[in-house]
Amino acid sequence: MPEDNIDHIDFKALNKKALSAPLVTHIYTADPSAHYFNGKIYIYPSHDIDAGEAFDDLGSHFAMEDYHVISMDNIDSKAVDNGVALHVDDVPWAKQQMWAPDANEKDGKFYLFFPAKDYEGIFRIGVAISDSPTGPFKAEPKAIEGSFSIDPAVFKDDDGAYYMYFGGLWGGQLQRWRTGVFNADQPESPTAFLPADDEPALLPLVAKMSEDLLAFGETPKALEILDENGDLLLSGDNDRRFFEAAWLHKHNGKYYFSYSTGDTHFICYAIGDSPYGPFIYTGRILNPVVGWTSHHSVCEVEGKTYLFYHDSSLSKGITHLRSVKVAELKYRQDGTIITLNPY
Ligand code: FUB
């Protein structure tokens, strides 16, 4: 239910038939990256605010300044806001727009990975460290060397290797890096430099992380998402191609790469045999929510799988004021996922 339809929405009726309610209502939260650390659920969301920026297709209205970590003792318990975990003012290289983060744990330390625009207006990805899953986190002085674009998701594989998945179109600037250097031409255009509709779609990136999780351990590689014939999805295949919100999880030994299709508002998934892919497009996880963006994570808690997602129902459709929700996700025998309808 994209932004232009909200005039016709009866929010009372919609909220009644909603799959789930916002986990917290005292602040707006979005882009939930959920993890199960030491028997508790930790959610690393964006913290949405109304900074008075006008709506545009570059996402200038997403002018977030800090992160709060939300924790839950179990899936039915109250969600607790642990306060400010990191503020943009405490990140030396970042100027604005603290977008979708993720976190992970290694050897008792917790690492928050986050995108923000630097002082040249270029999205980079940074790391901040804490001894606690709820922070506060201390940011590294510089962004990850060679990082660009948005929406980092850091997956730990069973062999102990960590991989970062990232990238996002339009305001996420991925299309500006096609030649390997940032293209600053036509700064107001969200769609300049995208491939033509009949060309392969832009791909998300993956890089194994260094041992200390503070750097890429290798040059990021493109993550191939193929159709049923083994061909790359096309740029004009807006219902299936990658747009933003990368996430990786494993189920029964298979790798599931999931993502948002952006302007068509689906959360889709593709399955592969390696953290590097290739991934075969398989289907939809979540149908469109109220609000323009859709962003999620998949987290296993005590033998059940949950989809953490967001919508703009609490703010009555204001696209940059979103709320994090959770619902159980179920697989069929063949490993495909049963699509959720949010209302
Ligand atoms: O929250 C800002 C941006 O909106 C995220 O980085 C995207 O994934 C979209 O949800």
Image (cartoon, rainbow, N blue to C red):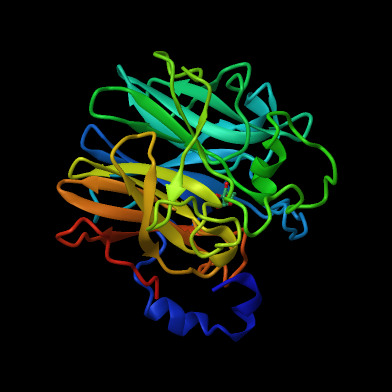
Q: Is residue 331 visible?
A: yes
Instruction: State the count of labels.
Output: 0
**Residue at 51% across, 52% down:** 29
Residue 54 falls in which quadrant of the image? bottom right
Is 147 drawn above or below residue 69 in the view shown? above
**Residue at 56% across, 52% down:** 243
Is 247 drawn above or below residue 105 in the view shown? below
Q: Percent x, y for residue 72?
A: 30, 46
Residue 209 falls in which quadrant of the image? top left
Q: Residue furthest right?
A: 186
Q: Is residue 63 visible?
A: no
| Image position of 69 (left or right of 125) | left
Give whichever of 151, 178 is nearer the camera. 178
Q: Quadrant for the N terminus, please.
A: bottom right
Q: Percent x, y for residue 226?
A: 43, 51
**Residue at 47% across, 39% down:** 223
**Residue at 43% across, 25% down:** 111
